[in-house]
Image (cartoon, grey):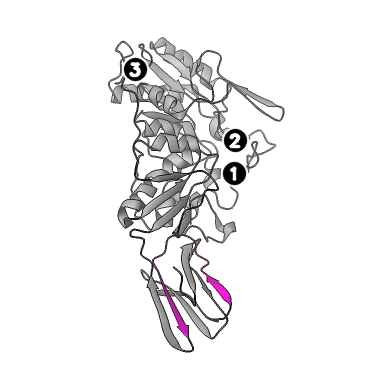
Amino acid sequence: MTDNEYTLDFNDGARLRVPMGNYHVRFTDLDTMNVLFESDFSDAVASSTKKYYIRFRVELWKDGQLILTHDLNLKDKNVHIIFPTGTLGDLIAWFPYAEEFRLKHGCRLYCTMQDELADLFRTTYPDVIYLHDGEEVPDCYATYHLGLYDAADGMSYNPLDHRTAGLQKVIPPMLGLDFKELRPELKHDPVRPIAEPYVCIATKSTAQAKLWNNPIGWKEVIAYLKDKGYRVLCIDKDRVLQVENAVFTMPEDAEDFTGNLPLQERVNLLAHADFFIGLASGLSWLAWASGTPVIMIAGFSLPFTEFYTPYRVINYHGCTGCWNDCSNSLDLKNFFSCPRHAGTDRVFECSRLITPEHVCHMIDRLMSDHDLDPGHTGNT
């Protein structure tokens, strides 16, 4: 909003520009009634250090006279939520809260995200306006940047550290929402793409600590699934992943369904799988969003980090949870990061000590819980 004397918006926090003169500015959090900022101002911009959702009251005095009191109100306003690009699991985890935010405030919500995810959400969330990276929102009243921030960022963009809150639980406080686990709504083709019963697996991720580093793990589990009568489809994006001198290939005993395919094709395949076995990575989130039971093999993060699944495979006899360790956490910029045991014989033991027998026991439990029999035609 603009007046001859000032310009006010909530794009990247509360921001109030005043011209030369004898001005006094105050920002208050109306929910806690804490004064967050107060100062005399002239020919400058007052900007809150907190950039996440706060129900601000902005007050402005000129020459000792109160000339503005404005309480943040998003109803019927253009609001912009910016998601990070290049991630899958994060967006699957976070997008339902953007819709919850839109419904709560009655705003016109614009969301910036990568095209393949926008294409996935358009049908089930038609009231959101989807933007490409760099597109601007007309007459934008408020902007919120969702992402994983930690104490090094001064906690300006979120009130909680994601390492102690979890990947999904960290987002609602950034948008002023109460937490409840929300699964995004996705549509899938009701026609089975494969007649025989099948299981999908994904074996690769963005860090070696996320992989199942047991050298015989996938081979043994795939053989176990085949003995039960399942086809085993590997749906990783990359058949071969090479990082520096290290090469990670698709398990040779699985069927090759790898490739950079549209996410909707992955959803159509996952929705009809009896279950999915993967890592703490994006395809596990996509399987969960598709309504498919998920066996998640992960030790670098603690179970509260990801969505709830009763089929989490973690071995507490070894090192676990470096991702959640605020003093010595995993560095995702370094694919080979093992912050506690790099260069020792304990490297990546968080997943290396997870045995194929452990995973097979979880398969049996899941199949019993869901009354699965590979002799049938699979889920519909």
Image-quadrant location for residue 248: top right
Question: In this figure, which residue is indicated by the disc labeled 1?
Answer: 330
Residue at which label 2 appears: 207
Nearer to us of marks 1 and 3 is 3
Q: Residue at the location (34% across, 58% down)? A: 76
Separation of disc 1 and disc 3 at Cα?
Answer: 39 Å
Q: Nearer the viewer, mark 2 or mark 3?
A: 3
Residue neighbourhood size for the residue with mark 1, other residues' Cα within 10 Å, grouped as few (<14), some (14–19), many (≥20): many
Mark 2 / mark 3, whichever is N-terminal: 3
Outermost residue, bottom side? 64
127 and 184: which one is in front? 127
| Mark 1 to mark 2 CA distance (whole Å) | 9 Å
Q: Nearer the viewer, residue 359 or 337?
A: 337
Q: Residue at x 43, y 51 (%)?
A: 171
For marks 1 and 2, the one nearer the N-term is: 2
Magenta span of residues: 41-62
Residue 192: give its label.
3
Q: Is residue 58 magenta?
A: yes
Q: Are marks 1 and 2 in contact (CB under 8 Å)?
A: yes
Q: Position of residue 48 (x, y in %)?
A: 51, 68
The three-letter amino acid code for the residue at tag 1 is Leu
Q: Is residue 164 above or below residue 116?
A: below
Residue 358 lies in the magenta-colored region: no
**Which x, y percent locates residue 252?**
56, 14
Mark 1 near mark 3, Cβ–Cβ under 8 Å? no
328 horizontally vs 89: left or right: right
Q: Amino acid at mark 3?
A: Arg
Which mark's residue is nearer the viewer, 1 or 2? 2
Q: Element under label 3?
A: loop
Crowding at label 3, few (<14), some or many (≥20) Cα neighbours within 10 Å? some
Please, is residue 293 above or below residue 220 in the view? below
Q: Residue furthest right?
A: 245
